[in-house]
Amino acid sequence: MTNAVAATPHSLCVYCGSRTGLHPGYARAAREVGTLIGRLGWRLVYGGGRAGLMGVVADAALAAGASVIGVIPSSLMERELGHGGLTELHVVETMHERKRLMAERSDAFLALPGGIGTFEELFEVWTWRQLGYHDKPLGLLNVDGYYDALLTFIATTMEQGFVAATQRDLLLVDASALPLLQRLGESAARAGEPEDYRRI
Ligand code: AMP
């Protein structure tokens, strides 16, 4: 682990499934990410629930001594099981407020396996980045090849002239958590502060 990463406390926003998925490897990876966040001395920012991989990553981060900030819309408190044991739980009115506050309180973003909500959150911060609304790094943890088909499709979008290589390269992809967190930490340390979420 490099000193640059260990010395810099970062807030990592994790997007992931409100379900755990079929294979135990998904929860294993979420647990590993939560534990690494604690060991690196980072803070976790996430959707504030106990459901699915969200709960797994939050519990592992808390167990590893990390501060954990959850942001949940009041309408989802029941469905996503608002987590009572977090360092901070912000209950907001709308999904837009949730995503904006999560983005504001983070300096890097990481998507784990998940469903439509996870895709939406990742693609949103990716588009915000390409538009220059923020300069924070984004990562995709491709656990057990879960995102292979998506990555193949993204290659198609490039071949067909809809996505530039520079846009594609904004997303850091890795199958292993620690190297990906290190790259995110190093990029976050280099990033400026041009973000202005009021434009979003
Ligand atoms: P999923 O990946 O579908 O299990 O959802 C993961 C998280 O994404 C959940 O906390 C959802 O509340 C959240 N999410 C974010 N944006 C949306 C959206 N537009 N529609 C549905 N879920 C969303």
Image (cartoon, grey):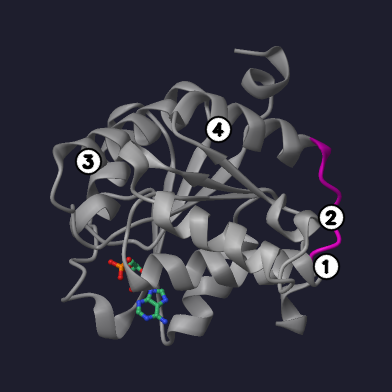
What whole-number distance in Å separates the C-alpha atoms at marks 2 and 4? 22 Å
Instruction: Kindly state the secondary structure of the residue where label 1 is placed.
Output: loop
Mark 3 residue crowding within 10 angstroms, few (<14) / some (14–19) / many (20+): many
Residue shown at the point (24%, 58%) measured from the top left: 83
- Type of secondary structure dominating the magenta stretch: loop
Residue shown at the point (42%, 34%) measured from the top left: 66
What whole-number distance in Å separates the C-alpha atoms at marks 2 and 1? 11 Å
The residue where tag 2 is placed is 193
Foreground disc of the pair 2, 1? 1
Q: Is 27 situated left or right of 146 in this image?
A: left
The residue where tag 1 is placed is 132
The answer to whether mark 3 is within 8 Å of ligand 1 is no
What whole-number distance in Å separates the C-alpha atoms at marks 3 and 4? 17 Å
- CB contact under 8 Å: marks 1 and 3: no
Q: Quadrant of residue 49?
A: bottom left
Instruction: Kindly state the secondary structure of the residue where label 3 is placed.
Output: helix
Instruction: Kindly state the secondary structure of the residue where label 4 is placed.
Output: helix
The residue where tag 3 is placed is 27
Which sits earlier in the primary sequence, circle 2 or circle 4? 4
Residue type at mark 1?
Gly
Which region of the structure is painted magenta? Answer: 190-195
Which sits earlier in the primary sequence, circle 4 or circle 1? 1
